[in-house]
Amino acid sequence: MAPVEALRRAGGGATVAQLDTVDLNGLRTVLAVDGVRMGRSCKPAWYHVELAVLPNGTAGWVPARAIHVYQVRSRIVVSLTQRRLRVYRSGTVVLETTVGIGAPSTPTPTGRFYVNERYVLSSSDGPFGPAALGISAHSTVLAQSWTENGPIALHGTNEPWSIGQADSHGCVHVPNDVMRRLFVLAPAGTPVVIRG
């Protein structure tokens, strides 16, 4: 992506957001491409992309020259009612596990998101376990009171008894051994679908 690029509505309309090559945490900015508009030369001129901003589901158009596009073969699907997470690789389930989800007062948001940040943590003894996958979702309850508008993540935990429970601040947590496998299977850009 170009150092600073305007994300626009309808391929050249009003600016939705200004994007930089790195995010607030110093990590490379990742967008999820879900559409393309071809130019006169039959090459991509604009990409329709999803953003990791509030409100959840914000999207816009960015010039094709501003981003590097790559294919991701993984997909993560979380069922809140079943408290299950499934990872698909080229359409085949390669990982399935029980998860902890948001408490009724701080629910896990539903919708279509993507992995936008990846963290390997220095100790697996902390509240996020050995690793975390930041996703483009934000808590609709904690957005005003938490840092960075209440970002949501898939992460491990130092409270294994919480797996299968609805007691988080909106994040989806998995057993630490599963988180290590999930981290390998989910590169930046991996689609994440969270269903009620």
Image (cartoon, rainbow, N blue to C red):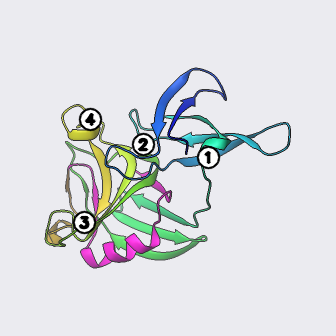
Q: Quadrant of the N terminus?
A: top right
- Residue type, mark 3 in image: Gly
Q: Counting other residues with Cα less than 10 Å from the Cα at mark 2, is it few (<14), some (14-19), or many (20 or more)?
A: many
Q: Is 149 above or below relative to 151?
A: above
Q: Where, by quadrant of the figure, is residue 180 drawn?
A: bottom left
Q: Where, by quadrant of the figure, is residue 133 drawn?
A: bottom left
Secondary-structure class at tag 4: loop
- Residue type, mark 2 in image: Ala
Which residue is identified by label 1? Answer: 34
- For discs 1 and 3, the disc positioned in front in the rendered view: 1
Q: Which residues are magenta?
A: 169-195
Secondary-structure class at tag 1: strand
Which residue is identified by label 3? Answer: 164
Sequence-first disc among 3 and 4? 4
Secondary-structure class at tag 3: loop
Please tell me the numbered disc located at residue 52. 2
Residue at x 62% of width, y 61% of height: 71
